[in-house]
Every structure is written in C-alpha cells, then in structure tokens.
Image (cartoon, rainbow, N blue to C red):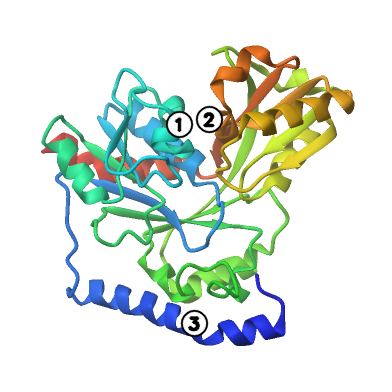
Amino acid sequence: MIESPLARALLFAPAKLYELAVRSRIVAYERGLLKTHRLNAPVISVGNLTVGGTGKTPCVAFIASTLRDAGHQVAILSRGYKRQTTGRIEVSDTKQILCSPAESGDEPFLLAQTCPGVRVLVDQDRYAAGHWLESRTKVSAFILDDAYQHLRLARDLNLLLVDATEPLARAAMVPFGRLREPLAQLRRADAIIVTRSNQNFDRSELIKTIRKHCNSDIPIFFAHHEMTRLRRLGSVESSSLAGLQAKKVAAVSGIAKPDRFNDDLQKAGSQIVLRRDFPDHHRYSSAEITEIINAAQTAKAEAIVVTEKDAANFPTELMHQFPLPVFAAQIEFRCSEASELKQMLLDVTARSHNS
C-alpha cells in the first residue's frame, strides 16, 4: 500500500484510469460485447478480489480431491503464474507428473503433487485449454485456479475466497490498496469462503460487508489452513509435526504472507533461530541455498523448514548436498461447514454424471 502523500497524488490519475478499465471490461462481458465461452463439463472457479495469498491452492486441492473421490474425472486449469514457459503445458495426467515446477509454475506443480489422479493443465487461455482437453479425453469437472477475473470462461459455480484478516470494508483498489476490482463485484460470487477464520477478526463486520454487495441468501463458509505433516525433501515419506517439538529450525518461505507460516511453526513447538523471507513464488538460486544453509548452521538450526510451494522452487540437484534435513510443511484446507460445501460441489457437478 502506498503511504507517501506525494506518491498518492502522482498515482491518482493512473489509478483511476486503471479502475475505469477494470469496470469497463466487466460491463463489456455483462452486456455481451465480449464473448463468454462454455465448456461441456461443469466448471468451478476459485478466486479472490485481492492481490496476494488468500489460500487458494489448498482450497483447490480440497475441491479436486472431493470430486475425484466422488468418481469424477477432474481437470484443474491454471495460468501457471511465473512459470518459465509459454503456451500450453500438461502438468499431470491421471498417472504421473509430466513436467518440472519451472515449466508449470510452483502452484500447478504443487496441485499435481497433492492431487494424484487429477489432470492439471496450464495455459493463459483456460477456455482453449479446456476445449483442447475435452477433445482428447473424458472430463466430468473442471476447476479454475485463481480465475475470478477470468471472465472469458463461463462457470457453473463461482467461489470467492476472502481473507478474514483483511479489513474488507475499508479495502481500496491497487495501487492504494489490494483490491483487483471494486468491492461491488462480490455480487458475481455464488458462495463466499472466508479463509484464515481461525484468526482474530470482526466476524459481524465482515458478514455485513459481504451482505451489502451480495444476495442475502448467498452461502458463506468459514475455513482455515492447518499445518498437518512434514515431508522431507528428496523423499516421499512424511512425519508428524511432533518432530518439531522443541527443535531449533530455520524457517524459509517465499509466499505472500510469511508471518502465518512462521506462526504455525511456533505453534507446532519449534524454535525459529533463523528466518528468511523471499518474494512470493521465489525461485531459489544455488547461491541463495548455500547462504541459507551456512546461516542456518551458524544459528545452530537442527533443520530447515519450508512451505511446500517453496520446496517446488528449490534446485533439486542440490538436495543430496544438504548437511541439514530440509522439511516441507504440508498444509490442508479445513472448513467448518465441510459437509455443506461438499454437497454444493457435488450438486453442481452431478449433471456430468447424469448426462
């Protein structure tokens, strides 16, 4: 957020032009001036109104696993943010992962790892990607990752994630705030999922803000993300969080909100003796890994703990050289109204099984 009065004054006109462009694009789709396309299979979109993390990836994994376990042939469509490739990349089929994290982007690769049996595809044009996939194999449910603003593709269920700790009522559009589009666009959502609801927040104010812009009967679900297990890098085996009890660790993360990750480590009983925060989606160089290891050893850390997204961005050729064990903390999506959310997902996708 921009605090300097001079910077705010200089950016006022460009910011208003950006907001006008966003509003004009939305109106163009609403009035049919820009065409919306539809896939044959039901489409569920997961996204948010703000820049930065609201916990979309664990939510997408939850949805994909729920539908896969119900017998659906599930495909996740993502744009592959910050990948080192262009065009269309198949990240995984129903049997294996087909590319590297650099080729797909860290989050699609993590989804492919987390959701075996689910197809993951990255393409800037998600309608074209879905159409291409449907012409080659059976898909009974599509999930769009980070697609609230991807208006070109019609969806059967539009899920909007809202961070409980964000002061939504006072939110402003970028660059003066974190909103990608005006708050009024809450109205496009078919359901709201409030993430990080296990943190302290004004529940009544948040619900009031949501209801101001949405239909009074729109479902609101409350969810959080729970650190559940540890996976040692270079191995498929995982262990319980008990291994962090009273252990000195170096916490390394390249995510939008690293404070949450560090808080979770401390709640698990670890003692953070070194902390390294990098930009979101950061891809680590060999020199950075060497510096982290040296600093961790100097701080007498017994292990290095990273997020699973960071694990995808570590140079794999160095794994066998690490003098300290490196663990990826596994995060799972938890919803207070899980049964209701699952039923909504199954209701929306039921027509693919009945067709």
Left or right: where 338 falls relative to 103: right
Tag 1–tag 3 contact (CB < 8 Å): no
Mark toward the start of the polypeptide (1 vs 2): 1
Q: Residue at x 31, y 50 (%)?
A: 124
Q: CA distance from mark 1 to mark 3?
A: 35 Å
* Residue under pointer 2: 312
The image shows residue 209 at horizontal and vertical percentages of 55, 72
The image shows residue 343 at horizontal and vertical percentages of 36, 42
* Residue under pointer 3: 14
Q: Residue at x 54, y 72 (%)?
A: 174
Left or right: where 270 falls relative to 20: right
Tag 1–tag 2 contact (CB < 8 Å): yes
* Dot 1 amino acid type: Pro
Helix, strand or loop at mark 2 = helix
The image shows residue 196 at horizontal and vertical percentages of 62, 49
Quadrant of the image occupied by residue 134: top left
Q: Is residue 310 above or below residue 1?
A: above
Q: Is residue 132 above or below residue 1?
A: above
Mark toward the start of the polypeptide (1 vs 3): 3
* Dot 2 amino acid type: Ala
Residue placed most toward the observer, 131 or 310: 310
* Dot 3 amino acid type: Pro
Q: Is residue 228 above or below residue 236?
A: below
Q: Which mark is residue 7?
A: none
Label 1 CA crowd tier, 10 Å (few <14, some 14–19, many 20+): many
Mark toward the start of the polypeptide (2 vs 3): 3
* Residue under pointer 1: 101
Label 2 CA crowd tier, 10 Å (few <14, some 14–19, many 20+): many
